Every structure is written in C-alpha cells, then in structure tokens.
C-alpha cells in the first residue's frame, strides 16, 4: 500500500503547481466518467499509450482473476467491452492526494464504483477501492495521463457477477 508523505499546499504554491494538481486528479475523473458514459475517447484520454492497469488486487476480494491490462487500447477495449450493453456504472472519486515530482506524479484516491446489470438492476455490486496511480505529463491532449494504476478493494457489497459476469 502506498503511503504518502504529509504535504500541504502553502500560500507559496504557484499557479502551475495548482493547475498540475487539478489536471492530475482530472485524469482519474476522465477514467471514471469515460466508463460511466461509455465514451471511448474520454476513457482513452486518461491513459498513457503504455499504461498498465492492475485490477487484480481488488478482484481478489471475491476470487476474481481479471487479466493485467497493458496498453491504453487494451485497457479501453477490456473495460468497455466487458460492460457495453451489460453493465451500467457510476464512479465517485474522493480523498485525492497528489505527490508531485518533476515530470511525474503519484495520486492516491478512494473510488466508489457502482455496477448494475442492465437486464436486471436488482443484481448490483458496490465497491470502495483504493487507487494508487503513477502519472506522467502527456505529450498531447490533457496535461497528465495515468501510466500505472493499481486498484485495491477496501470493501464490497452486492454480487460481483455485476462486474465480470
């Protein structure tokens, strides 16, 4: 588990640092909202081309064994392909913590993810997950993109079939 050092924004924090912090958290917002809207371009905009997404620690909470997702296109195809026409989602991001260091950043946040089967909304799963994310400045598009995402589960209620079938 990632533990960040205490860091407080001070009156001396410059506009560039504040903008970077907002753009870093926005990458995670794009990830969640891209899934919720089924918006391929928005979801893809959250990731570096060589990104890695590891949902295995979270899925281990209920015995799931998803693949390690490597590469922006694989991540987007896997997530949207698994949910399209089958699952409706909502994601809420809270408690974001940013640690900046040059052209790289680290973000931790809690994300609550609700999954409902579209054919039977009584089948649902609600997860609270801890995200540990490494980000880099984007060469094009938004200011920051996620390069490594590890998702660990804090708690789960409901039926995991609403996530993976």
Image: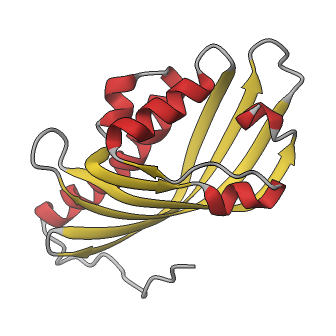
Q: How is the image coloured?
A: secondary structure
Question: Left of 84 or right of it: where is 17?
Answer: left
Vertical order, 154 against 92 (above or below): below
Total residue callouts:
0
Image location (x, y in percent) of residue 149:
45, 59
Vertical order, 117 against 12 (above or below): above
Question: Left of 29 or right of it: where is 160?
Answer: right
Question: Left of 149 or right of it: where is 154?
Answer: right
Q: Quadrant of the C terminus?
A: top right
Image location (x, y in percent) of residue 69:
47, 49
> Residue drawn 51% across and 83% down?
3
Query: Image quadrant of residue 8?
Result: bottom left
Vertical order, 49 against 44 (above or below): below
Q: Residue furthest bottom?
A: 5
Query: Image quadrant of residue 59?
Result: bottom right
**Viewer-nearest residue: 152 or 70:** 70
**Viewer-nearest residue: 135 or 56:** 56
Image location (x, y in percent) of residue 110:
59, 59
**Viewer-nearest residue: 59 or 94:** 59
> Residue drawn 38% across and 24% down?
40
Query: Image quadrant of residue 13?
Result: bottom left
> Residue drawn 57% across and 79% down?
1
> Residue drawn 45% across and 82% down?
4
Image location (x, y in percent) of residue 61:
79, 60
């Amino acid at each position: 588990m990632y533990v960040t050092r205490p860091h407080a924004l001070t009156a001396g924090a410059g506009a560039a640092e504040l903008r970077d912090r907002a753009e870093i958290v926005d990458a995670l917002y794009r990830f969640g909202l891209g899934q919720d809207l089924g918006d391929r371009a928005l979801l893809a905009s959250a990731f570096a081309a060589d990104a890695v997404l590891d949902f295995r620690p979270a899925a281990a909470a209920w015995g799931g064994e998803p693949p390690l997702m490597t590469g922006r296109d694989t991540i987007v195809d896997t997530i949207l392909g698994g949910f399209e026409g089958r699952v409706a989602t909502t994601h809420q991001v809270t408690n974001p913590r940013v640690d900046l260091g040059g052209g790289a950043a680290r973000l931790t946040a809690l994300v609550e993810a609700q999954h409902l089967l579209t054919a039977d909304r009584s089948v649902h799963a609600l997860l609270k997950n801890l995200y540990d994310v490494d980000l880099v400045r984007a060469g094009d598009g938004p200011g920051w993109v996620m390069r490594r995402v590890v998702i660990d589960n804090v708690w789960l209620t409901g039926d995991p079939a609403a996530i993976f079938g």
